[in-house]
């Protein structure tokens, strides 16, 4: 691990979501990359809530974001900081810029600005602020804003750690507002002041922020601060190569918890959004920390592939300890109305079920027949496998179970095979009615394993119930 040494500044990354909605896949990927980069370099990861949009920021979204970070295991060394608690500091930074002639009060009214914008666009120009108040030396006034006094010529170049060098002509940038007329700082000002104060060494974020970077670099300079390094990671597309949206399925991280995904599958899928390590698909958390670096973040858009996520989830479910799965299952069982069940039975059936389930929702479905007193009977399965013609077979099986019990599945298997031979039918002709009798379904683990888990009493009760059904 490349630990920061004395002459390299300590690596400090941040994740600064705006709590105006749930944490989405793109945000979670940004959080993960910042977390991995900090962990890889033995640095710090800072969480900051950019909650200055007073209309759209909600405490429920803050709680949702914190819960998602927790679910994904993205622990932070500092924070959460809240921008709304730092307003005084932003005012101080703005005053400093005003004092040094790097910012100015602007009295242009919104109506005037709209008129100018429309006039500029009418002659094919850009709707940029014309700098009318730049040299007027105005002071504060009701409705006034403070603007950054930007350079009129020259250019800014920065070396993006993912995209390489990027240059912006200063003529493209107008004097941006740093203090709004309502007394609140703008995003650009607050983000820069925060990143300076919090000693952020690397700003890793989505490439929708590339255009903001030169403006922010100029603000660092106006505040006489050192620049962090910037890395803009590629955008995320759906499998059809259009921008990822609800059309492609769930986009909020916590929806995946409800859909029955394990956080490690989610982390793996998120890590692969733009980053790769050879063609390895599945990584432990430690492997991700060991291998992650910005050099291996690609420049082209990343595709979020739900099939890949599902496949990873299946593998992680298979590898999970039954006790852990049993602890995660209650909400998924409750969603099926199962709240009162025998924990020992659940633990006993899980090893049979995990190879079959891709999500915890599916796992709860597979587990249902083992946990309820009387499983729901699938009418199609009943029609096909529990008709009157099955009564003799079921009676023979019941007699075998009654005589021998279910504790020796291999013996029972032999007996039932002999029974099939004696009746001149394939094993399936015996097994399938028994399966439907025991589980209400045509799909289940092997019937002898099912019998072993259910135990004599329940097997007998279910065979009796099936015989009653079949005799009708
Ligand atoms: N609050 C901003 C966002 O959620 C942060 C952008 C940044 O990383 O600078 O997009």
Image: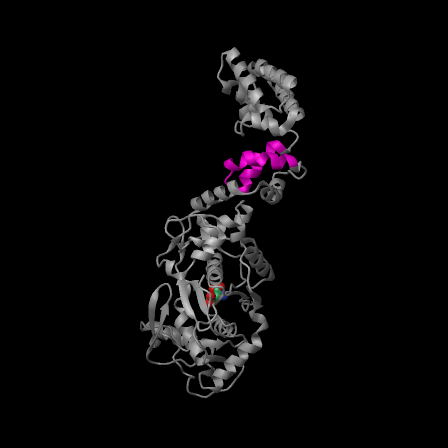
Q: Is residue 408 left or right of residue 28?
A: right
Q: Is residue 421 above or below residue 84?
A: above
Q: Quadrant of the N terminus?
A: bottom left
Residue interval drawn in magenta: 344-370
Task: Indicate the position of residue 63 as horizontal and vertical percent values.
Answer: 59, 59
Q: Position of residue 74 (x, y in %)?
A: 53, 58
- In the figure, is residue 345 to the left or right of 208? right
**Figure quadrant of the C terminus:** top right
Residue farthest toward the bottom in the current orientation of the protein: 137
The foreground one among 338 and 271 is: 271
Instruction: Please give the name of the residue rendered at 46% of the width and 76% of the height, measured from the top-left corner.
Output: 177
Front residue (pair 13, 194): 13
Q: Nearer the viewer, residue 418 or 229?
A: 418
Total marks in image: 0
Residue 376: image location, x then y, percent: 61, 30
Relative to 327, does residue 275 appear above or below in the rendering?
Answer: below
For residue 378, say whether it is visible.
no
Magenta stretch: residue 29 in it? no
The colour mode here is one colour
| Magenta region, main secondary structure | helix
Q: Position of residue 21 (x, y in %)?
A: 53, 59
In which image quadrant can residue 388 be found? top right
Q: Is residue 246 above or below residue 399?
A: below
Reply above or below: 309 against 47. Answer: above
Q: Does the image show residue 221?
A: yes
- The answer to whether residue 357 is magenta is yes
- The residue lying furthest to the left in this view is 124
């Amino acid at each position: 691990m490349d630990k920061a040494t004395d002459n390299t500044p300590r690596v400090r990354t941040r994740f600064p979501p705006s709590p105006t909605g749930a944490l989405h896949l793109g945000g979670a990927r940004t959080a993960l990359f910042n977390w991995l980069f900090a962990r890889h370099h033995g640095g710090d990861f800072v969480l900051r809530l950019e909650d200055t949009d007073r209309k759209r920021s909600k405490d429920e979204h803050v709680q949702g974001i914190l819960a998602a970070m927790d679910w994904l295991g993205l622990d932070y060394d500092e924070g959460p900081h809240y921008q709304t608690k730092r307003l005084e500091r932003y005012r101080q930074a703005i005053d400093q810029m005003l004092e040094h002639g790097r910012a100015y009060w602007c009295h242009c009214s919104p109506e005037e600005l709209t008129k100018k914008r429309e006039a500029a666009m009418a002659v094919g120009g850009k709707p940029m602020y014309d700098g009318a108040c730049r040299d007027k030396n105005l002071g504060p006034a009701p409705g006034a804003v403070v603007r950054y006094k930007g350079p009129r010529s020259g250019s800014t170049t920065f070396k993006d750690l993912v995209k390489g060098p990027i240059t912006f002509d200063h003529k493209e940038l107008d004097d941006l507002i740093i203090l709004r007329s309502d007394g609140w700082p703008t995003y650009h000002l607050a983000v820069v002041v925060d990143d300076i104060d919090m000693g952020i060494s690397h700003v890793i974020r989505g490439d929708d922020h590339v255009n903001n970077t030169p403006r922010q670099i100029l603000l660092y300079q106006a505040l006489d601060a050192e620049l962090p390094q910037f890395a803009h990671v590629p955008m995320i597309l759906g499998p059809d190569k259009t921008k990822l949206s609800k059309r492609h399925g769930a986009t909020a991280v916590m929806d995946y918890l409800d859909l029955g995904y394990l956080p490690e599958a989610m982390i793996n899928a998120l890590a692969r959004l733009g980053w790769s390590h050879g063609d390895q698909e599945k990584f432990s958390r430690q492997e991700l920390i060991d291998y992650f670096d910005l050099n291996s973040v690609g420049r082209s858009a990343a595709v979020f592939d739900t099939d890949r996520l599902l496949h990873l989830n299946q593998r992680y479910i298979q590898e999970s300890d039954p006790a852990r799965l049993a602890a995660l299952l209650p909400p998924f069982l409750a969603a099926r109305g199962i709240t009162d069940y025998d924990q020992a039975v659940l633990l006993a059936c899980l090893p049979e079920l995990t190879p079959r389930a891709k999500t915890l929702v599916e796992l709860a479905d597979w587990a249902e027949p083992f946990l309820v007193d009387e499983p729901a009977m699938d009418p199609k399965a009943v029609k096909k496998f529990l008709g009157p013609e099955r009564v003799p077979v079921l009676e023979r099986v019941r007699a075998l179970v009654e005589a021998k019990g279910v504790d020796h599945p291999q013996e029972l298997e032999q007996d039932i095979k002999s029974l099939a031979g004696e009746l001149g039918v394939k094993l399936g002709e015996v097994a399938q009615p028994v399966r439907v009798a025991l589980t209400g379904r045509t799909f289940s683990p092997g019937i002898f394993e099912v019998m072993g888990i259910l135990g004599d009493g329940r097997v007998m009760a279910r065979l009796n119930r099936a015989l009653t059904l079949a005799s009708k």
